[in-house]
Image (spheres, coloured by chain):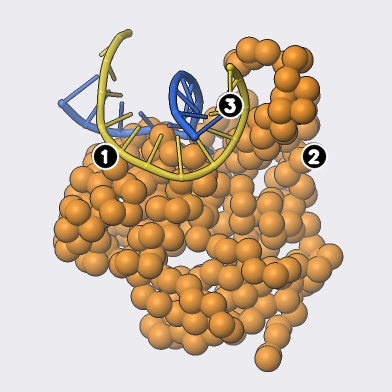
Chain colours: A orange, B yellow, C blue
Amino acid sequence: MKFTKIRAPAFDLEKTLESGQVFHWQKVGDGFVGVIGDLPVYVEQRGNVLTVRDGEAVRSPRRPLPGIVARYFALDHPLAEICDSFPKDPVMNAARDFCHGLRIIPQPKWECLATFICSSMKQVAHIRQISMALGKRFGEQRRIDDHLVYTFASPPRLAQASEKELRDCKLGYRTKNLRKTARLVSSGHADLEAWSALSDAELRKQLCALPGVGPKMANCVLLFAYERLGEFSETYFGEHGGYAQQYLFHHARMADAAIGRLRSIAPTSERNERS
DNA sequence: CTCCAGGGATGAT
DNA sequence: ATCATCCATGGA
């Protein structure tokens, strides 16, 4: 067992993995297993130190593991500066406090786009199931210790999948959108990598033209896959609006869950509130 | 603008 | 146990 240690200040692994940006990591013991691109990885956190261990990759040219992990978890983002730039209102303050150490993972573009097409009108638990099902059926199997993990399904693989196979992954009405978009990407008609060179506005326009992608999902992909961290909501949220947005959503989801738990304990209080 | 499209999780009864 | 409601939405 060969473990590598990586210093990771101002980082919270669990919050980062469970805040609704990526959906394929599984809790195992004190850590998580998943894939970073093609590479199967186990990662666990103790204080400011990550302990990581990789399995065998097949496609990726091997780079040193610490660099891969540090980049994946965005350890190079200046988090203190980012949080400092958030507006100072009560809601934002609470979110910033709650989400301490949450970093926005720079995701592989296709993985991010496809996942968000699958995510419309789905809750996090659902998206996780879909993501797992797609990986298991259409991804490539990798092994880390005694755990099986799966790479994200490639555009050509999804493009050639039958509608029934996709529906079996609980995709529902998203099936056609995912398949159509997979075909556009697979054929080169939509070149996600080349789009990196586009301006924010132009990139958004291209994304919105894809089946199943509207303004909301386009923003998510802009933020998570193209690292346009401050592109939207900049007027109020400042330079790092994307980060602010993510913190607010995660905090709100967790707060809702907490209210739910309270209600089940004390059913007479807290009736009928929604904003 | 309205309406609808999976289905699992979650809460209410 | 069963029933209703919800869901980081997009397209018709």
In the depicted view, which residue is nearer to us: B1 or A30? Answer: A30
Q: Can residue A235 be seen in this view?
A: yes
Please state which amino acid type lies under the numbered disc 2: Asp
Which residue occupies the extreme bottom position in the image?
Answer: A1
Label of residue A85 in the image: none
The residue where tag 2 is placed is A97
A234 is higher (above) or lower (below) than A106: above
Mark 3 vs mark 2, foreground winner is 2
Q: Which residue is drawn at the image coordinates 60% and 16% (left, top)?
A: A274
Dot 1, how many residues are within 10 Å of its Cα: few (below 14), some (14-19), or many (20+)? few
Label of residue A173 in the image: 1
Please state which amino acid type lies under the numbered disc 3: Thr
Instruction: Give residue A260's position: percent from left, percent from top.
Output: 68, 29
The residue where tag 3 is placed is A235
Side of A216 where B13 appears, left or right: right
Which of the marked residues, 1 or 2, is nearer the chain's N terminus? 2
**Chain of the residue under label 3:** A
Dots 1, 2 in contact, CB < 8 A: no
Q: Which residue is drawn at the image coordinates 60% and 15% (left, top)?
A: A275
Please state which amino acid type lies under the numbered disc 1: Tyr
Helix, strand or loop at mark 1:
loop
Which residue occupies the extreme right position in the image?
Answer: A47
Mark 1 and mark 2: Cα distance apart in space: 38 Å
Mark 3 vs mark 1, foreground winner is 1
Query: Is circle 1 on the same chain as circle 2?
Result: yes
Which of the marked residues, 3 or 2, is nearer the chain's N terminus? 2
Q: Which residue is drawn at the image coordinates 19% and 54% (left, top)?
A: A164
**Chain of the residue under label 1:** A
Instruction: Give residue A271's position: percent from left, percent from top.
Output: 68, 13
Helix, strand or loop at mark 2:
helix
Query: Is circle 3 on the same chain as circle 2?
Result: yes
Query: Is circle 3 on the same chain as circle 1?
Result: yes
